[in-house]
Image (spheres, rainbow, N blue to C red):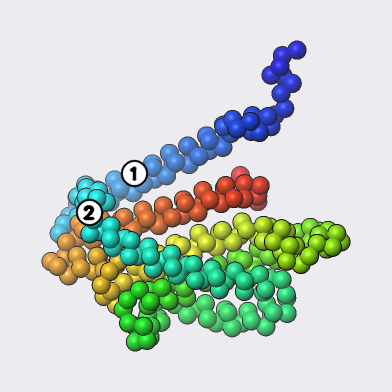
Amino acid sequence: MNALATTPRGAARRTGAPDRPKAARALIALARGVAGAGLVTLAFEGFARLELVDPKLFPPASVILPKALTLLVDPAFLREVAATLTALVSGVGVAAVIAVPLGVILGSYRLAATAFTPIIDSLRSVPGIAIIPLLVLILGQGLEMKVTVVVFVTVWPLLFNTMYGVQAVDRVAIETAHSFRVPTLMRWRRVVLPSALPLMLTGLRLALSTGLTVAIAAEIAVGSHEGVGYFILRASYAGFHADVVFAAVVLAGVLGYGLNMLVTAATERLVAWDTRGAS
């Protein structure tokens, strides 16, 4: 009998062979993304070439993209990127320390959730940009201010995704662990947190994208002396180099996309068992 005919379907996966359908889906998604970006670039180029807006203020993509490639190897710009990333990572880290334990508590105890949800909903309705003037008065224009505003806007997606993840844990699994007299801390560590991890990572992905936007906006709003926002603001004031401004904005978008892909890759590796988002 042919040996291949008796090989279990899952043998290729267990022996480390590539998952062809998954790889094909990834390539198709990449091709679609590249095609979409190409179409947007061509549309931008065509609109700019019509010169309905002064080319000095609205340069074409053929001018912006080479400038973006130049900035990628510019040490001065890379230092500003590092400054923004420092504020972003620090803020999201502090937000996670606050949000994850609180989300676990609110997700585990309905009474606590009922008591604190109105307060949380009121606070998260406040735009992060609105508190920047107050933070500048208290903390100045430096790193502390940027970290604080990033914490304020990123704590909410982390908190709610952790809370919803805990609430969505299979009650049968919890009751089974309880019936086997698994200690409470171990039950949370082995059952609750792993089950909630997919949604928690989704919250992290949302927090990174939101935090990056707010960090750059804060740098522009207060005239910070470092960061991508400062770089954009300086290029705007120094004779308004529109190509530099647009190139920096494009690279900020690429940075956000890269962070999103990084968390997505980590999610696929850490919670590969989760099939709720599988197509």
Position of 209 with respect to 14 (left or right) is: left
- Depth check: give the residue in front, 129 or 268: 268
Helix, strand or loop at label 2? It is loop
Location of residue 233 (image quadrant): bottom left
Residue sticking out furthest to the top: 1
Helix, strand or loop at label 1? It is helix
Q: Which mark is residue 74?
A: 2
Image vertical order of residue 191 relative to residue 126, above or below:
above
Residue labelled with disc 1: 38
Specify the quadrant that holds the N terminus: top right
Please provide percent x and percent y for residue 41.
Answer: 30, 48
Location of residue 247 (image quadrant): bottom left
Position of 275 with respect to 246 (left or right) is: right
Please provide percent x and percent y for residue 86.
Answer: 38, 65
Please provide percent x and percent y for residue 31.
Answer: 43, 39
Cα–Cα gap, marks 1 and 2: 25 Å
Image vertical order of residue 140 relative to residue 34, above or below:
below
Residue drawn where x is 22% and y is 47% of the image: 66
Look at discs 1 and 2 and give the one toward the viewer: 2
Is residue 61 visible to the viewer in this orientation of the structure? no
Q: Earlier in the sequence, mark 1 or mark 2?
A: 1
The amino acid marked with disc number 2 is Asp
Is residue 241 visible to the viewer in this orientation of the structure? yes
Residue drawn where x is 52% and y is 62% of the image: 204
Specify the quadrant that holds the C terminus: top right
- Depth check: give the residue in front, 37 or 155: 155
Image vertical order of residue 139 relative to residue 54, above or below:
below
- Depth check: give the residue in front, 95 or 245: 95
Residue drawn where x is 43% and y is 76% of the image: 148
